[in-house]
Structure formats: C-alpha cells, structure tokens
Image (cartoon, helix red, strand yellow):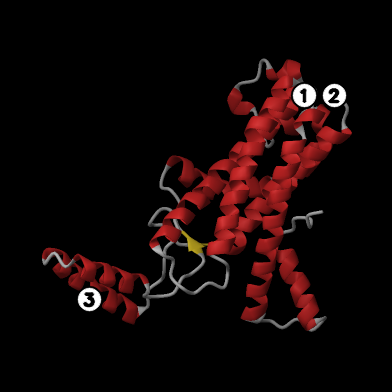
C-alpha cells in the first residue's frame, strides 16, 4: 500500500524530530532540509502512482455512465500523465542535483512541468463532473460548465456533498495559490527549468565561448562548434527551480511541485472514498 501523501512541512518536522529530538536549533542544517525534500519527493511519487491505479479501478464501481466517462477518460488519463511527468522530474532533477541539465533533459522537463500544472486543474474538474453526474444528475443538467468545480457552490454548498465539502474546504487556500502556477502554463508564458545558474566567472566564460562558437560557425568548423556548445552546457550549477514570466522570480521545485501534487492526491482520495462509501 502506498504511503499516505503528506506535505513537506510534516516530513521536515519528522526528520528534525529524528535528528534533533526536542532540541531543534534555530537554523536547520542544510543536509536535513535536502534529505526531507528528497524523502518527500519519493512519498509523492508513490502516492501519485497509487492515485492513478485507484482511478483506473474506480469506473466499474460507478453506476452513472457520464460519471464513469469522466473518471475513465478524464481523471485516469490525467493522473497517468501527471505521474509519468513527475517521475521524470524527480529522477532527472532531484533536490541534490548540481550538474547542469543537458539540452534534451531541459526540453523534456519543460514539457513535464507544464503537463503537471495543466492537468492538476483538469483532474479536479473531471472529479467534480463525475460527482455531479453520479449523485446529483438533475442539477448538472442546468449548470453552466464554468460552474462545475470542486471549489464552487455546486459541490461545496450542495447538501449531498456535505462530508466531502468539509475536506475540500481545507484545500481552499491552496486552490487559490496553485493558480499562480497553473494559469501561466495554460494562458500566458509556459513554465521552464533553467539548465543551470551561472556564477560571475561562469558568465564571463560563457560569453567567451559564445564568441568562439560564432567564429566556428562562420568558419564552417561545425565539429569545433559542437565542442564549444558542450563546454557551455557544463558551466554553472543546476538549481532545482522553475520559472515562467521573466518579471517573476524563480520558484523552488521542492517542495512546491510535490506539495501541489500532495493536495491533488488528497482531494482525489477524498472523492474516491466518497464514491465507495456513498450509495448512488
């Protein structure tokens, strides 16, 4: 059975308790912080995979055809994409990585992080559609599609979902916060992972290599140009950050992304339990 998804602060507190006991220092050692981030990333990896498996197994237990449709072809597909993309992220760009990303890694992770955030909201919406079709089919016939959401009154103010709404309410602040990462990916500037961060010396050397690269291209020295590009890619150190709009600073991958997926999985588990415990 997969370990229960928890937030990073809970993992960090546990690690501090193990290492420091009751004498927690004012400044936590970097090693403890990085260890907690790595442990948390793996817990969420496992939990996101388990959520996908549970979503695949759920449709036969649902009576309404439209509700089954949203779980089988909506939530299940999205959770599979999220799990696969997050697996790539946690594998290629773990919290302790220092080596700059290769070009193919950078491109792949740019795709993966956008897949994660584009599908977080879509998964939640699929769950809301499934709930309404299964437990309040008459109401959904007259609801505008824009009002179908776990976080809108169709679910939260509906007496049929009172027990579920109590859990959804606990994630309200997160729902507002995650839009700052989801909305750029969907509507403005896509998210990306910088391959490396250059120090002052690295930046100077990068510019020198850029001039050498241009000269090699002009001289049709293409093998030399490839060697220069390879040298450029090895400059600097990788930082586990992602970015979107240039005016906005970088965001830490850990614990931001695994925490966001923790909220998603916790909400999915609540909906999953609701389907299994409440008769149609």
* Quadrant (top left/top right/bottom left/bottom right) for the N terminus: bottom right
Q: Earlier in the sequence, mark 3 or mark 1?
A: 1
Query: Which label number is shown at residue 134?
Result: 1
| Foreground residue among 81 and 268 | 81
Q: Earlier in the sequence, mark 3 or mark 2?
A: 3
Callout 1: SS? helix
Callout 2: SS? loop
Q: Quadrant of residue 21?
A: bottom right
Q: Quadrant of residue 42?
A: bottom right
Q: Are marks 1 and 2 in contact (CB under 8 Å)?
A: yes
Query: What is the number of callouts on the image?
Result: 3
Left-right relation of 196 to 131 = left
Of all residues, the one furthest to the front in this rendering is: 223
Whether residue 149 is visible here, answered yes or no, is no
Instruction: Examine the rendered structure and indicate whether residue 51 appears above or below residue 242.
Output: above
Q: Which residue is tagged 2?
A: 280
Residue occupying image coordinates x 60% and y 47%: 82
Residue 163, horizontal then vertical, whole percent: 84, 37
* Quadrant (top left/top right/bottom left/bottom right) for the C terminus: top right
Instruction: Examine the rendered structure and indicate whether residue 188 appears above or below residue 248.
Output: above
Residue occupying image coordinates x 32% and y 74%: 231
Q: Work out how far the residue at label 3 is from the one at label 2, CA to CA, in angstroms.
A: 69 Å
Q: Work out how far the residue at label 1 is from the one at label 2, CA to CA, in angstroms.
A: 7 Å
Q: Work out how far the residue at label 3 is from the one at label 1, CA to CA, in angstroms.
A: 64 Å
Query: Which label number is shown at residue 208?
Result: 3
Instruction: Examine the rendered structure and indicate whether residue 121 appears above or below residue 216.
Output: above
Instruction: Rate crowding at label 3 as few (under 14), some (14 to 19) or many (20 or more) other CA atoms within 10 Å.
Output: few
Callout 3: SS? helix
Residue occupying image coordinates x 48% and y 56%: 109
């Amino acid at each position: 059975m997969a370990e229960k998804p928890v937030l990073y602060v809970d993992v960090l507190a546990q690690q501090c308790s193990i290492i420091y006991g009751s004498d927690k220092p004012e400044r936590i050692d970097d090693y403890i912080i990085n260890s907690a981030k790595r442990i948390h990333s793996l817990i969420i990896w496992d939990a996101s995979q388990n959520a996908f498996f549970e979503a695949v197994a759920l449709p036969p237990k649902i009576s309404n055809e439209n509700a089954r449709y949203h779980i089988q072809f909506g939530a299940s597909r999205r959770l599979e994409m999220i799990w696969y993309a997050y697996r790539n992220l946690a594998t290629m760009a773990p919290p302790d990585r220092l080596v700059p990303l290769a070009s193919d890694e950078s491109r792949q992770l740019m795709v993966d992080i956008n897949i994660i955030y584009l599908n977080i909201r879509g998964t939640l919406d699929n769950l809301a559609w499934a709930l309404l079709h299964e437990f309040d089919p008459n109401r959904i016939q007259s609801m505008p599609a824009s009002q179908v959401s776990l976080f809108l009154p169709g679910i939260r103010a509906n007496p049929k979902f009172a027990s579920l709404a109590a859990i959804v309410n606990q994630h309200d602040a997160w729902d507002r916060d995650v839009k700052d990462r989801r909305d750029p990916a969907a509507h403005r500037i896509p998210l990306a992972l910088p391959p490396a961060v250059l120090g002052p010396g690295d930046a100077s050397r990068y510019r020198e290599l850029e001039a050498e690269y241009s000269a090699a291209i002009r001289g049709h020295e293409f093998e030399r140009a490839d060697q220069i590009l390879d040298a450029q890619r090895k400059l600097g150190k990788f930082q586990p950050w992602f970015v979107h709009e240039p005016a906005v600073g970088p965001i830490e991958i850990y614990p931001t992304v695994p925490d966001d997926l923790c909220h998603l999985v916790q909400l999915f588990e609540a909906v999953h339990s609701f389907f299994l415990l409440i008769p149609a």
